[in-house]
Amino acid sequence: MKQHPYQPGHLLDYLKATFLHKVVTESRSAAGNWLQFTLEKIEKGASTISLPIRPEMANPFGMIHGGMMALAIDEAIGWAVVSLEAPTFYTSVNLQVDFLYAIKVGERMLVSAEVVRHGKKMIYVKSEVHHENGTLLATATSHLVVTGMQANTPNN
């Protein structure tokens, strides 16, 4: 993300003012910026992103590559976790994805993530991926562990 005037307890307001309902191309995540998703929702412990499936995200059959769907899931999880405004960063321990249906190039998917448990050392998050028509495409869960790196500072 671009540098912003940091005020503890106001990061969520900053995220809403800067990114909500916009195509995200200037976040801290270069991979997320590459996805060119729209931040549809951001609340404490929850996020939803949407994105069109581009040809460079596809497998040889013109459907989304599983790794690309996992990237979008991981990105939505990251936004949900950042919205907690925790004092330290968290990093993924695992990402368990169940792929149910594919989605074609040119179609749009929505990825939601919700923090289920925010403990002192671990965060547990669940995620769902839907086709723009409402079809459930995938479900996922992830555990994240606290790191020693300080978060929510102007230089992070």
Image: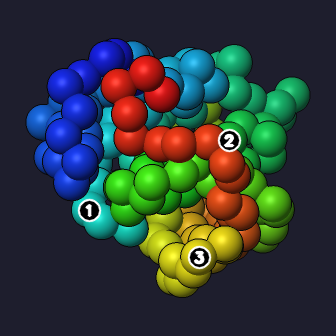
Residue at point 43% right, 21% down? 155
What amino acid does circle 2 point to? Answer: Leu
Please report whichever mark, 1 or 2, sits nearer to the chain's N-terminal start: 1
Which of the 4 image quadrants contains residue 143? bottom right
Say whether residue 54 is visible: no
- For label 3, the SS is loop
- Residue 16, image x, y percentages: 18, 43
Which numbered disc, 2 or 3, marks the residue that appears first in the sequence?
2
From this view, report whether residue 52 is shown above or below residue 154: below
- Left or right of 28? Residue 105 is right
Direction from residue 38 to residue 129 in the image, left or right: right
- What residue is shown at x 49% (from left), y 64% (from top)? 113
At numbered mark 1, what does the secondary structure look like: helix, strand or loop? strand
- Contact flag, marks 2 and 3 (Cβ < 8 Å): no
- How many neighbours does mark 1 have within 10 angstroms: few (below 14), some (14-19), or many (20 or more)? some
Residue 10, given in percent of the width and then of the height, sits at 18, 48
Amino acid type, residue under disc 1 in the picture: Glu
The correct choice, above or below, for 33 with respect to 127 in the image is above
In the depicted structure, whether residue 118 falls above or below residue 22: below
Q: CA distance from mark 2 to mark 3?
A: 26 Å
Disc 1 vs disc 3: Cβ atoms closer than 8 Å? Answer: no
Q: Which residue is mark 3?
A: 120
User: Which residue is labeled 1 in the image?
Assistant: 43
* Crowdedness near tag 3: few (<14), some (14–19) or many (≥20) residues, C-alpha within 10 Å: few
Q: Nearer the viewer, mark 2 or mark 3?
A: 3
Find disc 2 in the rendering and name its residue: 71
Estimate the x, y position of residue 20 in percent, counting from the top left. 21, 40
| 1 or 3: mark nearer the eye | 3
User: Is residue 76 rendered to the left or right of residue 24?
Assistant: right
Of residues 46 and 55, the one nearer the viewer is 46
The amino acid sitting under disc 3 is Lys
What is the total number of numbered labels drawn onto the structure image? Answer: 3
